[in-house]
Amino acid sequence: MTSYDPEREWTFTSQGGHTRTVPLHLYWELDGDPITDDWIPAEITAAELWENWLDRYVNQPTRPRPTPCAVTIYWSVQGPGISETAPFQDWTGRGLRREPENFLSFYTWPTDPKTDERLQWTRLPVVDKLWRARRADKGGFIQEHTGWKPSPLQATVDIDQIAQAAGVKRPKLVQQ
């Protein structure tokens, strides 16, 4: 199934009764990818950030993982004036006492304003995150360096598979 048009608008209502009609998309964040908060592209390349991130977050995990190179993906739903945790994420093994509140905790299920079709969450467009002179997205070095971005609501990624496919430095955990 294909993603919705990124410009497609969705109507939803807040708990307070305010109705909005705006485009929505999924924003992804890998464990440790905010490492980019410390730099700008003029100071460090995507390749250098990749290596730094591998050493800090992949080769020395801060949380238990199902496999040595599995990295958790956190998702949020974003749009103009909207940024909420995405629903239907797998929270197993994340060390939480309970599942966090999400978009549906605060808003009704989005529908198409013309057809009343309910939004299918796994068809929302996934944001491109880049790391270059005019666009320094948090964690953008991963997509910039490897060409990879996750499928909607994908729970984890095996970083070694991504590195192998992209022909870039692999995690030490699997190197011989």
Image: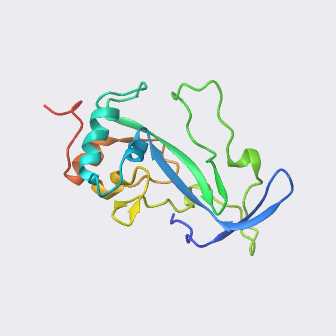
Question: For this view, does 86 lie left or right of residue 93?
Answer: right
The tally of labels here is: 0
Residue that protrudes farthest toward the right in the picture: 17
Front residue (pair 150, 141): 141
Rendered residue at 52%/29% (across/down): 94
Q: Position of residue 73 (x, y in %)?
A: 47, 42
Q: Position of residue 90 (x, y in %)?
A: 55, 37
Q: Quadrant of residue 143?
A: bottom left
Question: For this view, does 129 lie left or right of residue 168?
Answer: right
Which quadrant of the figure contains the C terminus? Answer: top left
Name the colouring of the figure: rainbow
Front residue (pair 138, 86): 138
Rendered residue at 52%/65% (across/down): 3
Rendered residue at 19%/52% (across/down): 167
Question: For this view, does 1 lie left or right of residue 82?
Answer: left
Establish if 31 lies above or below 11: above
Q: Position of residue 100 (x, y in %)?
A: 65, 35
Residue that protrudes farthest toward the left in the picture: 176
Rendered residue at 54%/30% (across/down): 92
